[in-house]
Amino acid sequence: MVSAKKKPIGIFDSGIGGLTVFKEIKEILPSEDLYYLGDTARVPYGTKSPEVIRRYAEGNIRFLVGQGAKVVVVACNTASATALDHVRAVFPDIPIIGVVEPVVKYLSSRSDTENIGVIGTTTTIGSGVYQSALESLGKTIRAKACPLFVPLVEEGIVVHPLVDQVIDYYLADFREVAIDTLVLGCTHYPLLRPALEAYFRNKVFIIDSAVPTAVALRDLLTRSGLSNDVSGKGEERFFVTDAAESFRRIGGRFLGRPLSTVEHI
Amino acid sequence: MVSAKKKPIGIFDSGIGGLTVFKEIKEILPSEDLYYLGDTARVPYGTKSPEVIRRYAEGNIRFLVGQGAKVVVVACNTASATALDHVRAVFPDIPIIGVVEPVVKYLSSRSDTENIGVIGTTTTIGSGVYQSALESLGKTIRAKACPLFVPLVEEGIVVHPLVDQVIDYYLADFREVAIDTLVLGCTHYPLLRPALEAYFRNKVFIIDSAVPTAVALRDLLTRSGLSNDVSGKGEERFFVTDAAESFRRIGGRFLGRPLSTVEHI
Protein backbone atom coordinates (compact mmCIF):
# COMPACT_ATOMS: atom_id res chain seq x y z
CA MET A 1 0.00 0.00 0.00
CA VAL A 2 1.23 3.47 -0.87
CA SER A 3 1.86 5.57 2.23
CA ALA A 4 -0.36 8.64 2.55
CA LYS A 5 2.69 10.87 2.18
CA LYS A 6 3.49 9.46 -1.26
CA LYS A 7 0.00 10.04 -2.64
CA PRO A 8 -0.63 12.86 -5.13
CA ILE A 9 -2.12 16.27 -4.49
CA GLY A 10 -5.36 16.71 -6.43
CA ILE A 11 -6.06 20.10 -7.99
CA PHE A 12 -9.08 21.05 -10.05
CA ASP A 13 -10.56 23.99 -11.89
CA SER A 14 -13.36 24.44 -14.40
CA GLY A 15 -10.73 24.64 -17.10
CA ILE A 16 -7.25 25.99 -17.53
CA GLY A 17 -7.29 28.94 -15.11
CA GLY A 18 -6.26 26.80 -12.16
CA LEU A 19 -2.95 26.16 -13.89
CA THR A 20 -1.82 29.51 -12.50
CA VAL A 21 -2.19 27.92 -9.04
CA PHE A 22 -0.71 24.62 -10.20
CA LYS A 23 2.38 26.46 -11.40
CA GLU A 24 3.02 28.03 -8.01
CA ILE A 25 2.41 24.76 -6.16
CA LYS A 26 4.91 23.06 -8.46
CA GLU A 27 7.37 25.85 -7.67
CA ILE A 28 7.27 25.58 -3.88
CA LEU A 29 6.50 21.85 -3.59
CA PRO A 30 8.59 20.41 -6.43
CA SER A 31 8.80 16.85 -5.07
CA GLU A 32 5.03 16.37 -4.70
CA ASP A 33 3.05 14.45 -7.31
CA LEU A 34 0.43 16.79 -8.77
CA TYR A 35 -2.76 15.58 -10.50
CA TYR A 36 -4.68 18.37 -12.20
CA LEU A 37 -8.26 18.05 -13.45
CA GLY A 38 -9.74 20.65 -15.83
CA ASP A 39 -13.51 20.23 -16.18
CA THR A 40 -13.40 21.53 -19.74
CA ALA A 41 -16.64 19.82 -20.81
CA ARG A 42 -18.57 22.11 -18.44
CA VAL A 43 -16.42 25.25 -18.36
CA PRO A 44 -17.09 28.03 -17.40
CA TYR A 45 -18.36 27.84 -13.83
CA GLY A 46 -18.52 31.59 -13.24
CA THR A 47 -21.86 32.13 -14.96
CA LYS A 48 -23.55 29.11 -13.39
CA SER A 49 -25.55 28.74 -10.21
CA PRO A 50 -24.09 27.67 -6.86
CA GLU A 51 -26.22 24.49 -6.92
CA VAL A 52 -24.76 23.36 -10.23
CA ILE A 53 -21.22 24.25 -9.20
CA ARG A 54 -21.52 22.23 -5.98
CA ARG A 55 -22.55 19.21 -8.02
CA TYR A 56 -19.65 19.67 -10.45
CA ALA A 57 -17.11 20.26 -7.65
CA GLU A 58 -18.25 17.11 -5.87
CA GLY A 59 -17.84 15.07 -9.05
CA ASN A 60 -14.37 16.48 -9.68
CA ILE A 61 -13.20 15.67 -6.16
CA ARG A 62 -14.66 12.17 -6.39
CA PHE A 63 -12.50 11.63 -9.46
CA LEU A 64 -9.34 12.97 -7.81
CA VAL A 65 -9.93 10.92 -4.66
CA GLY A 66 -10.42 7.90 -6.91
CA GLN A 67 -6.96 8.66 -8.31
CA GLY A 68 -5.59 8.51 -4.76
CA ALA A 69 -5.38 12.22 -3.88
CA LYS A 70 -4.27 12.81 -0.27
CA VAL A 71 -5.52 16.40 -0.31
CA VAL A 72 -7.49 18.50 -2.80
CA VAL A 73 -6.98 22.09 -3.90
CA VAL A 74 -10.05 23.82 -5.35
CA ALA A 75 -8.06 26.03 -7.75
CA CYS A 76 -11.14 27.95 -8.86
CA ASN A 77 -12.53 30.99 -7.11
CA THR A 78 -16.11 30.31 -8.17
CA ALA A 79 -16.08 26.79 -6.74
CA SER A 80 -14.18 27.97 -3.65
CA ALA A 81 -16.76 30.70 -3.05
CA THR A 82 -19.81 28.49 -3.46
CA ALA A 83 -18.95 24.83 -2.92
CA LEU A 84 -16.26 24.55 -0.24
CA ASP A 85 -18.53 23.84 2.74
CA HIS A 86 -20.45 21.35 0.66
CA VAL A 87 -17.47 19.31 -0.51
CA ARG A 88 -15.84 19.37 2.92
CA ALA A 89 -19.04 17.82 4.30
CA VAL A 90 -19.17 15.22 1.52
CA PHE A 91 -15.47 14.24 1.89
CA PRO A 92 -14.76 14.60 5.62
CA ASP A 93 -11.57 12.50 5.45
CA ILE A 94 -9.87 14.54 2.70
CA PRO A 95 -8.35 17.91 3.58
CA ILE A 96 -9.70 20.39 1.01
CA ILE A 97 -8.46 23.94 0.57
CA GLY A 98 -9.85 26.67 -1.62
CA VAL A 99 -8.31 29.83 -3.01
CA VAL A 100 -10.41 32.45 -1.21
CA GLU A 101 -9.39 31.84 2.41
CA PRO A 102 -5.62 32.01 1.71
CA VAL A 103 -5.97 35.36 -0.06
CA VAL A 104 -8.09 36.80 2.75
CA LYS A 105 -5.64 35.51 5.35
CA TYR A 106 -2.75 37.07 3.49
CA LEU A 107 -4.49 40.44 3.24
CA SER A 108 -5.33 40.35 6.96
CA SER A 109 -1.58 40.45 7.61
CA ARG A 110 -1.01 43.64 5.62
CA SER A 111 -1.76 47.03 7.10
CA ASP A 112 -1.13 48.94 3.86
CA THR A 113 -4.17 47.52 2.07
CA GLU A 114 -7.19 49.51 3.10
CA ASN A 115 -9.09 50.35 -0.03
CA ILE A 116 -9.52 47.06 -1.81
CA GLY A 117 -11.11 46.23 -5.14
CA VAL A 118 -12.14 42.63 -5.75
CA ILE A 119 -12.86 41.29 -9.22
CA GLY A 120 -14.15 37.88 -10.22
CA THR A 121 -16.84 35.98 -12.07
CA THR A 122 -20.53 36.79 -11.74
CA THR A 123 -21.07 33.88 -9.36
CA THR A 124 -18.00 34.59 -7.20
CA ILE A 125 -18.88 38.25 -6.75
CA GLY A 126 -22.55 37.38 -6.32
CA SER A 127 -21.66 35.00 -3.48
CA GLY A 128 -20.31 37.95 -1.44
CA VAL A 129 -17.66 35.70 0.10
CA TYR A 130 -14.71 38.02 -0.51
CA GLN A 131 -16.69 41.09 0.47
CA SER A 132 -17.86 39.81 3.84
CA ALA A 133 -14.49 38.27 4.75
CA LEU A 134 -12.56 41.45 3.91
CA GLU A 135 -15.10 43.79 5.47
CA SER A 136 -14.80 41.84 8.71
CA LEU A 137 -11.11 42.81 8.65
CA GLY A 138 -12.14 46.46 8.61
CA LYS A 139 -11.16 47.06 5.00
CA THR A 140 -13.12 49.14 2.49
CA ILE A 141 -14.26 46.86 -0.30
CA ARG A 142 -15.51 47.42 -3.82
CA ALA A 143 -16.44 44.36 -5.83
CA LYS A 144 -17.08 43.97 -9.54
CA ALA A 145 -17.94 41.00 -11.70
CA CYS A 146 -15.96 41.04 -14.97
CA PRO A 147 -17.49 38.24 -17.04
CA LEU A 148 -15.69 39.16 -20.26
CA PHE A 149 -12.24 38.63 -18.74
CA VAL A 150 -12.41 34.82 -18.85
CA PRO A 151 -13.37 34.63 -22.54
CA LEU A 152 -10.62 37.14 -23.36
CA VAL A 153 -8.03 35.00 -21.62
CA GLU A 154 -9.41 31.78 -23.11
CA GLU A 155 -9.08 33.48 -26.51
CA GLY A 156 -5.49 34.34 -25.77
CA ILE A 157 -6.23 38.07 -26.05
CA VAL A 158 -4.24 39.37 -23.09
CA VAL A 159 -2.15 42.22 -24.47
CA HIS A 160 -4.17 44.22 -26.98
CA PRO A 161 -6.04 47.57 -27.10
CA LEU A 162 -9.26 45.56 -26.82
CA VAL A 163 -8.16 44.29 -23.41
CA ASP A 164 -7.58 47.85 -22.22
CA GLN A 165 -11.05 48.81 -23.39
CA VAL A 166 -12.69 45.90 -21.59
CA ILE A 167 -10.72 46.72 -18.43
CA ASP A 168 -11.85 50.32 -18.64
CA TYR A 169 -15.45 49.17 -19.16
CA TYR A 170 -15.42 47.34 -15.85
CA LEU A 171 -12.85 49.13 -13.72
CA ALA A 172 -13.05 52.87 -14.43
CA ASP A 173 -14.73 53.31 -11.01
CA PHE A 174 -11.90 51.50 -9.25
CA ARG A 175 -9.35 53.79 -10.82
CA GLU A 176 -11.39 56.86 -10.00
CA VAL A 177 -11.69 56.04 -6.29
CA ALA A 178 -7.99 55.10 -6.25
CA ILE A 179 -8.10 51.62 -4.76
CA ASP A 180 -4.75 50.62 -3.27
CA THR A 181 -5.17 46.87 -3.76
CA LEU A 182 -6.76 44.71 -6.44
CA VAL A 183 -7.69 41.11 -5.68
CA LEU A 184 -7.76 38.91 -8.79
CA GLY A 185 -10.58 36.69 -7.62
CA CYS A 186 -10.45 34.33 -10.59
CA THR A 187 -7.58 32.05 -11.54
CA HIS A 188 -7.74 33.21 -15.16
CA TYR A 189 -6.99 36.81 -14.33
CA PRO A 190 -3.24 36.58 -13.64
CA LEU A 191 -2.77 36.47 -17.41
CA LEU A 192 -4.26 39.98 -17.53
CA ARG A 193 -1.88 41.24 -14.84
CA PRO A 194 0.38 43.23 -17.21
CA ALA A 195 -2.63 44.99 -18.74
CA LEU A 196 -4.14 45.63 -15.29
CA GLU A 197 -0.85 46.98 -13.93
CA ALA A 198 -0.61 49.37 -16.85
CA TYR A 199 -4.25 50.44 -16.42
CA PHE A 200 -3.65 51.31 -12.77
CA ARG A 201 -0.30 52.91 -13.68
CA ASN A 202 1.59 50.49 -11.41
CA LYS A 203 0.11 52.23 -8.37
CA VAL A 204 -2.03 49.35 -7.16
CA PHE A 205 -0.91 46.24 -5.33
CA ILE A 206 -2.31 43.31 -7.32
CA ILE A 207 -2.70 39.96 -5.63
CA ASP A 208 -3.89 36.69 -7.11
CA SER A 209 -4.71 33.28 -5.67
CA ALA A 210 -1.58 31.40 -6.63
CA VAL A 211 1.09 32.20 -4.03
CA PRO A 212 -1.18 32.39 -0.94
CA THR A 213 -2.84 29.11 -1.91
CA ALA A 214 0.43 27.31 -2.52
CA VAL A 215 1.71 28.54 0.84
CA ALA A 216 -1.50 27.43 2.57
CA LEU A 217 -1.13 24.02 0.96
CA ARG A 218 2.47 23.67 2.13
CA ASP A 219 1.41 24.61 5.66
CA LEU A 220 -1.42 22.09 5.56
CA LEU A 221 0.84 19.27 4.41
CA THR A 222 3.38 20.05 7.13
CA ARG A 223 0.75 20.39 9.84
CA SER A 224 -0.99 17.15 8.93
CA GLY A 225 2.19 15.14 8.33
CA LEU A 226 1.27 14.55 4.69
CA SER A 227 4.33 16.06 2.98
CA ASN A 228 6.07 13.74 0.57
CA ASP A 229 9.46 13.06 2.14
CA VAL A 230 11.06 11.76 -1.04
CA SER A 231 13.34 14.22 -2.76
CA GLY A 232 13.46 14.58 -6.54
CA LYS A 233 10.96 15.81 -9.05
CA GLY A 234 7.33 14.88 -8.53
CA GLU A 235 5.16 13.40 -11.24
CA GLU A 236 2.52 15.55 -12.92
CA ARG A 237 -0.65 14.39 -14.65
CA PHE A 238 -3.31 16.43 -16.40
CA PHE A 239 -6.87 15.21 -16.86
CA VAL A 240 -9.63 16.94 -18.83
CA THR A 241 -13.29 16.16 -19.39
CA ASP A 242 -13.32 17.47 -22.97
CA ALA A 243 -10.80 17.13 -25.80
CA ALA A 244 -7.19 17.29 -24.67
CA GLU A 245 -5.70 19.19 -27.58
CA SER A 246 -6.91 22.73 -26.90
CA PHE A 247 -6.15 22.30 -23.20
CA ARG A 248 -2.59 21.36 -24.06
CA ARG A 249 -2.23 24.32 -26.39
CA ILE A 250 -3.75 27.03 -24.20
CA GLY A 251 -2.48 25.44 -21.01
CA GLY A 252 1.07 25.88 -22.20
CA ARG A 253 0.40 29.62 -22.23
CA PHE A 254 -0.60 29.46 -18.56
CA LEU A 255 2.39 27.41 -17.46
CA GLY A 256 4.84 29.12 -19.75
CA ARG A 257 6.08 25.72 -20.92
CA PRO A 258 4.69 22.78 -22.91
CA LEU A 259 2.41 20.45 -20.94
CA SER A 260 3.18 16.78 -20.50
CA THR A 261 0.52 14.32 -21.61
CA VAL A 262 -3.10 15.40 -21.15
CA GLU A 263 -5.55 12.56 -20.50
CA HIS A 264 -9.20 12.72 -21.54
CA ILE A 265 -11.50 11.11 -18.99
CA MET B 1 -53.76 8.88 -26.59
CA VAL B 2 -52.69 12.27 -27.89
CA SER B 3 -52.59 12.33 -31.70
CA ALA B 4 -49.18 13.00 -33.19
CA LYS B 5 -50.45 16.30 -34.60
CA LYS B 6 -51.27 17.62 -31.11
CA LYS B 7 -47.82 16.88 -29.70
CA PRO B 8 -45.38 19.70 -29.00
CA ILE B 9 -42.44 20.82 -31.09
CA GLY B 10 -39.20 20.39 -29.14
CA ILE B 11 -36.52 23.08 -29.51
CA PHE B 12 -33.17 23.18 -27.80
CA ASP B 13 -30.06 25.29 -27.56
CA SER B 14 -27.06 25.40 -25.24
CA GLY B 15 -28.69 28.37 -23.54
CA ILE B 16 -30.76 31.36 -24.50
CA GLY B 17 -29.55 32.00 -28.05
CA GLY B 18 -32.07 29.59 -29.55
CA LEU B 19 -34.85 31.84 -28.35
CA THR B 20 -34.22 33.93 -31.48
CA VAL B 21 -35.36 30.85 -33.44
CA PHE B 22 -38.15 30.08 -30.98
CA LYS B 23 -39.52 33.59 -31.48
CA GLU B 24 -39.79 33.17 -35.25
CA ILE B 25 -41.36 29.71 -34.96
CA LYS B 26 -43.92 31.15 -32.57
CA GLU B 27 -44.61 33.87 -35.12
CA ILE B 28 -45.31 31.65 -38.11
CA LEU B 29 -46.73 28.63 -36.25
CA PRO B 30 -48.76 30.29 -33.48
CA SER B 31 -51.04 27.35 -32.78
CA GLU B 32 -48.25 24.82 -32.18
CA ASP B 33 -47.19 23.89 -28.66
CA LEU B 34 -43.52 24.79 -28.25
CA TYR B 35 -41.26 23.22 -25.62
CA TYR B 36 -37.86 24.90 -25.35
CA LEU B 37 -34.88 23.43 -23.52
CA GLY B 38 -31.86 25.61 -22.66
CA ASP B 39 -28.90 23.50 -21.50
CA THR B 40 -27.69 26.29 -19.26
CA ALA B 41 -25.75 24.01 -16.92
CA ARG B 42 -23.34 23.21 -19.75
CA VAL B 43 -23.43 26.40 -21.86
CA PRO B 44 -21.56 27.38 -24.01
CA TYR B 45 -21.20 24.67 -26.66
CA GLY B 46 -19.17 26.76 -29.08
CA THR B 47 -15.83 26.23 -27.37
CA LYS B 48 -16.31 22.50 -26.80
CA SER B 49 -15.40 19.49 -28.90
CA PRO B 50 -17.76 17.80 -31.38
CA GLU B 51 -17.68 14.60 -29.27
CA VAL B 52 -18.93 16.39 -26.18
CA ILE B 53 -21.57 18.33 -28.12
CA ARG B 54 -22.92 15.13 -29.68
CA ARG B 55 -23.36 13.69 -26.19
CA TYR B 56 -25.11 16.82 -24.93
CA ALA B 57 -27.37 17.07 -28.00
CA GLU B 58 -28.40 13.45 -27.61
CA GLY B 59 -29.32 14.01 -23.95
CA ASN B 60 -31.31 17.13 -24.79
CA ILE B 61 -33.31 15.37 -27.49
CA ARG B 62 -33.93 12.40 -25.19
CA PHE B 63 -35.49 14.82 -22.71
CA LEU B 64 -37.68 16.52 -25.35
CA VAL B 65 -38.81 13.20 -26.78
CA GLY B 66 -39.64 12.14 -23.23
CA GLN B 67 -41.86 15.23 -23.07
CA GLY B 68 -43.67 13.99 -26.16
CA ALA B 69 -42.00 16.07 -28.90
CA LYS B 70 -43.23 15.15 -32.40
CA VAL B 71 -40.27 16.88 -34.05
CA VAL B 72 -37.09 18.50 -32.75
CA VAL B 73 -35.39 21.72 -33.81
CA VAL B 74 -31.69 21.98 -33.00
CA ALA B 75 -31.73 25.77 -32.52
CA CYS B 76 -27.97 25.97 -32.08
CA ASN B 77 -25.48 26.31 -34.90
CA THR B 78 -22.71 24.51 -33.04
CA ALA B 79 -24.88 21.45 -32.38
CA SER B 80 -26.34 21.60 -35.91
CA ALA B 81 -22.84 21.72 -37.39
CA THR B 82 -21.43 18.84 -35.37
CA ALA B 83 -24.20 16.59 -34.05
CA LEU B 84 -27.04 16.43 -36.58
CA ASP B 85 -26.04 13.17 -38.29
CA HIS B 86 -25.43 11.60 -34.91
CA VAL B 87 -28.79 12.48 -33.37
CA ARG B 88 -30.69 11.58 -36.54
CA ALA B 89 -29.11 8.12 -36.31
CA VAL B 90 -29.93 7.80 -32.60
CA PHE B 91 -33.57 8.94 -33.02
CA PRO B 92 -34.60 7.60 -36.45
CA ASP B 93 -38.33 8.03 -35.72
CA ILE B 94 -38.18 11.72 -34.82
CA PRO B 95 -37.76 14.29 -37.59
CA ILE B 96 -34.89 16.55 -36.54
CA ILE B 97 -33.95 19.79 -38.26
CA GLY B 98 -30.96 21.98 -37.64
CA VAL B 99 -30.30 25.64 -38.41
CA VAL B 100 -27.47 25.29 -40.94
CA GLU B 101 -29.26 23.52 -43.80
CA PRO B 102 -32.18 26.02 -43.97
CA VAL B 103 -29.78 28.98 -44.19
CA VAL B 104 -27.74 27.30 -46.94
CA LYS B 105 -30.91 26.40 -48.83
CA TYR B 106 -32.15 29.97 -48.59
CA LEU B 107 -28.85 31.38 -49.87
CA SER B 108 -28.85 28.92 -52.76
CA SER B 109 -32.01 30.65 -54.01
CA ARG B 110 -30.43 34.10 -54.13
CA SER B 111 -28.27 35.15 -57.01
CA ASP B 112 -27.21 38.47 -55.44
CA THR B 113 -25.14 36.85 -52.68
CA GLU B 114 -21.77 36.01 -54.09
CA ASN B 115 -19.19 37.19 -51.60
CA ILE B 116 -20.31 35.74 -48.31
CA GLY B 117 -18.85 36.09 -44.83
CA VAL B 118 -19.82 33.49 -42.25
CA ILE B 119 -19.34 34.04 -38.53
CA GLY B 120 -19.94 31.64 -35.68
CA THR B 121 -18.41 29.93 -32.68
CA THR B 122 -14.98 28.31 -32.75
CA THR B 123 -16.49 24.84 -33.10
CA THR B 124 -19.03 25.81 -35.79
CA ILE B 125 -16.42 27.52 -37.96
CA GLY B 126 -13.92 24.75 -37.21
CA SER B 127 -16.41 22.16 -38.49
CA GLY B 128 -16.29 23.74 -41.95
CA VAL B 129 -19.95 22.87 -42.51
CA TYR B 130 -21.05 26.29 -43.73
CA GLN B 131 -17.93 26.76 -45.82
CA SER B 132 -18.24 23.50 -47.75
CA ALA B 133 -22.00 23.82 -48.27
CA LEU B 134 -21.76 27.38 -49.57
CA GLU B 135 -18.67 26.74 -51.68
CA SER B 136 -20.50 23.91 -53.40
CA LEU B 137 -23.03 26.56 -54.48
CA GLY B 138 -20.22 28.43 -56.22
CA LYS B 139 -20.10 31.27 -53.71
CA THR B 140 -16.94 32.91 -52.40
CA ILE B 141 -16.73 32.25 -48.66
CA ARG B 142 -14.80 33.83 -45.83
CA ALA B 143 -15.33 32.36 -42.36
CA LYS B 144 -14.38 33.73 -38.97
CA ALA B 145 -14.89 32.44 -35.45
CA CYS B 146 -15.94 35.26 -33.10
CA PRO B 147 -15.83 33.68 -29.63
CA LEU B 148 -16.27 36.95 -27.75
CA PHE B 149 -19.68 37.66 -29.31
CA VAL B 150 -21.55 35.11 -27.17
CA PRO B 151 -20.23 36.41 -23.83
CA LEU B 152 -21.03 39.97 -24.94
CA VAL B 153 -24.61 39.04 -25.71
CA GLU B 154 -24.93 36.96 -22.53
CA GLU B 155 -23.72 40.03 -20.65
CA GLY B 156 -26.36 42.15 -22.33
CA ILE B 157 -23.71 44.34 -23.95
CA VAL B 158 -25.16 44.72 -27.44
CA VAL B 159 -25.13 48.44 -28.14
CA HIS B 160 -21.96 49.99 -26.79
CA PRO B 161 -18.63 51.29 -28.15
CA LEU B 162 -17.08 48.10 -26.75
CA VAL B 163 -19.24 46.04 -29.11
CA ASP B 164 -18.02 48.07 -32.08
CA GLN B 165 -14.43 47.48 -31.04
CA VAL B 166 -14.94 43.73 -30.71
CA ILE B 167 -16.68 43.65 -34.09
CA ASP B 168 -13.77 45.53 -35.63
CA TYR B 169 -11.32 43.12 -33.96
CA TYR B 170 -12.89 40.18 -35.77
CA LEU B 171 -14.41 41.62 -38.93
CA ALA B 172 -12.13 44.34 -40.27
CA ASP B 173 -11.09 41.93 -43.05
CA PHE B 174 -14.69 41.32 -44.05
CA ARG B 175 -15.31 45.03 -44.40
CA GLU B 176 -12.11 45.50 -46.34
CA VAL B 177 -12.95 42.86 -48.96
CA ALA B 178 -16.52 44.19 -49.14
CA ILE B 179 -18.54 41.06 -48.51
CA ASP B 180 -22.11 41.40 -49.78
CA THR B 181 -23.68 38.95 -47.33
CA LEU B 182 -23.05 38.11 -43.69
CA VAL B 183 -24.33 34.83 -42.25
CA LEU B 184 -24.91 34.98 -38.49
CA GLY B 185 -23.96 31.38 -37.82
CA CYS B 186 -24.83 31.48 -34.13
CA THR B 187 -28.26 32.00 -32.62
CA HIS B 188 -26.90 34.60 -30.20
CA TYR B 189 -25.74 36.93 -32.92
CA PRO B 190 -29.08 38.43 -34.00
CA LEU B 191 -28.89 40.60 -30.89
CA LEU B 192 -25.76 42.18 -32.39
CA ARG B 193 -27.51 42.84 -35.70
CA PRO B 194 -27.92 46.63 -35.17
CA ALA B 195 -24.23 46.98 -34.30
CA LEU B 196 -23.24 44.79 -37.25
CA GLU B 197 -25.46 46.72 -39.66
CA ALA B 198 -23.87 49.97 -38.53
CA TYR B 199 -20.38 48.49 -38.82
CA PHE B 200 -21.03 47.46 -42.42
CA ARG B 201 -22.80 50.78 -43.09
CA ASN B 202 -26.04 49.01 -44.03
CA LYS B 203 -24.38 47.76 -47.21
CA VAL B 204 -24.36 44.08 -46.34
CA PHE B 205 -27.27 41.64 -46.40
CA ILE B 206 -27.34 40.02 -42.98
CA ILE B 207 -29.07 36.69 -42.54
CA ASP B 208 -29.59 34.70 -39.37
CA SER B 209 -30.98 31.26 -38.64
CA ALA B 210 -34.42 32.20 -37.39
CA VAL B 211 -36.63 32.77 -40.43
CA PRO B 212 -35.18 30.06 -42.72
CA THR B 213 -35.38 27.52 -39.88
CA ALA B 214 -38.97 28.41 -38.98
CA VAL B 215 -39.94 28.11 -42.65
CA ALA B 216 -38.16 24.76 -42.95
CA LEU B 217 -40.02 23.56 -39.87
CA ARG B 218 -43.38 24.64 -41.27
CA ASP B 219 -42.62 22.82 -44.54
CA LEU B 220 -41.59 19.71 -42.64
CA LEU B 221 -44.79 19.68 -40.57
CA THR B 222 -46.92 20.12 -43.68
CA ARG B 223 -45.03 17.48 -45.67
CA SER B 224 -45.18 14.91 -42.87
CA GLY B 225 -48.78 15.62 -41.88
CA LEU B 226 -47.72 16.64 -38.38
CA SER B 227 -49.17 20.18 -38.29
CA ASN B 228 -51.43 20.85 -35.35
CA ASP B 229 -54.86 21.36 -36.88
CA VAL B 230 -56.35 23.05 -33.82
CA SER B 231 -56.63 26.79 -34.09
CA GLY B 232 -55.89 29.09 -31.16
CA LYS B 233 -52.74 29.93 -29.32
CA GLY B 234 -50.32 27.08 -28.62
CA GLU B 235 -48.84 26.37 -25.21
CA GLU B 236 -45.20 27.28 -24.50
CA ARG B 237 -42.93 25.75 -21.89
CA PHE B 238 -39.33 26.58 -21.07
CA PHE B 239 -36.96 24.11 -19.43
CA VAL B 240 -33.43 24.81 -18.23
CA THR B 241 -30.71 22.63 -16.72
CA ASP B 242 -29.38 25.38 -14.43
CA ALA B 243 -31.16 28.00 -12.34
CA ALA B 244 -34.26 29.43 -13.99
CA GLU B 245 -33.98 33.02 -12.81
CA SER B 246 -31.20 34.35 -15.04
CA PHE B 247 -32.68 32.52 -18.02
CA ARG B 248 -35.99 34.26 -17.41
CA ARG B 249 -34.31 37.64 -17.10
CA ILE B 250 -31.96 37.44 -20.10
CA GLY B 251 -34.41 35.37 -22.13
CA GLY B 252 -36.92 38.20 -21.98
CA ARG B 253 -34.36 40.32 -23.80
CA PHE B 254 -34.24 37.75 -26.61
CA LEU B 255 -37.99 37.41 -26.95
CA GLY B 256 -38.70 41.06 -26.38
CA ARG B 257 -41.37 40.11 -23.83
CA PRO B 258 -41.44 38.49 -20.38
CA LEU B 259 -41.15 34.69 -20.37
CA SER B 260 -43.82 32.46 -18.94
CA THR B 261 -42.76 30.00 -16.25
CA VAL B 262 -39.28 28.52 -16.60
CA GLU B 263 -38.87 25.00 -15.23
CA HIS B 264 -35.58 23.71 -13.82
CA ILE B 265 -34.95 20.06 -14.69
Image (cartoon, coloured by chain):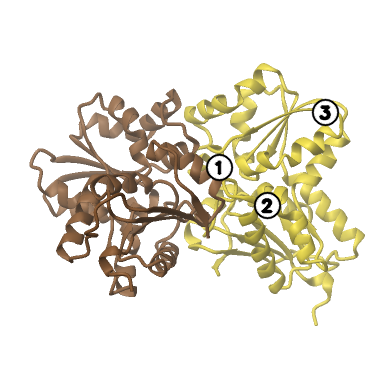
Chain colours: A yellow, B brown
Cα separation, mark 3 vs mark 1, equals 27 Å
CA separation in Å, label 1 and label 2: 15 Å
Please identify the quadrant where the N terminus of chain A is shown: bottom right
From the viewer's perspective, is the residue at label 1 or at label 2 nearer? 2
| Residue B193 image offset from top left, x and y in percent | 32, 33
Q: Secondary structure at mark 3?
A: loop
Q: Position of residue A265 (x, y in %)?
A: 55, 70
- Which residue corresponds to the image point at 54% horizontal and 25% vertical from the top-left? A169
Q: Is residue A90 above or below residue B35?
A: below
Q: Are marks 3 and 1 on the same chain?
A: yes
Chain for numbered disc 3: A
Q: Secondary structure at mark 2?
A: helix
Counting residues from the N terminus, which is met first, the one under dot 3 or under dot 1? 3
For residue A68, above or below residue B249: below
**Is the Cβ of the residue at disc 3 closer than 8 Å to that at disc 1?**
no
Amino acid carrying label 2: it is Ala
Residue pointed to by mark 2: A79
Question: Tag 3 or tag 2, which sits nearer the N-term?
Answer: 2
**View extreme (left): residue:** B111
Nearer the observer, disc 3 or disc 1?
A: 3
At 37% from the left edge and 49% from the top edge, which residue is drawn? B18
Instruction: Tell me if I can see residue A201 in this picture.
Output: no
Give the residue number, with chain letter if any, for mark 3. A139
What's under tag 3, amino acid-wise?
Lys
**Left-right relation of B163 to A216:** left
The residue pinned by badge 1 equals: A150
Q: CA distance from mark 2 to mark 3?
A: 24 Å
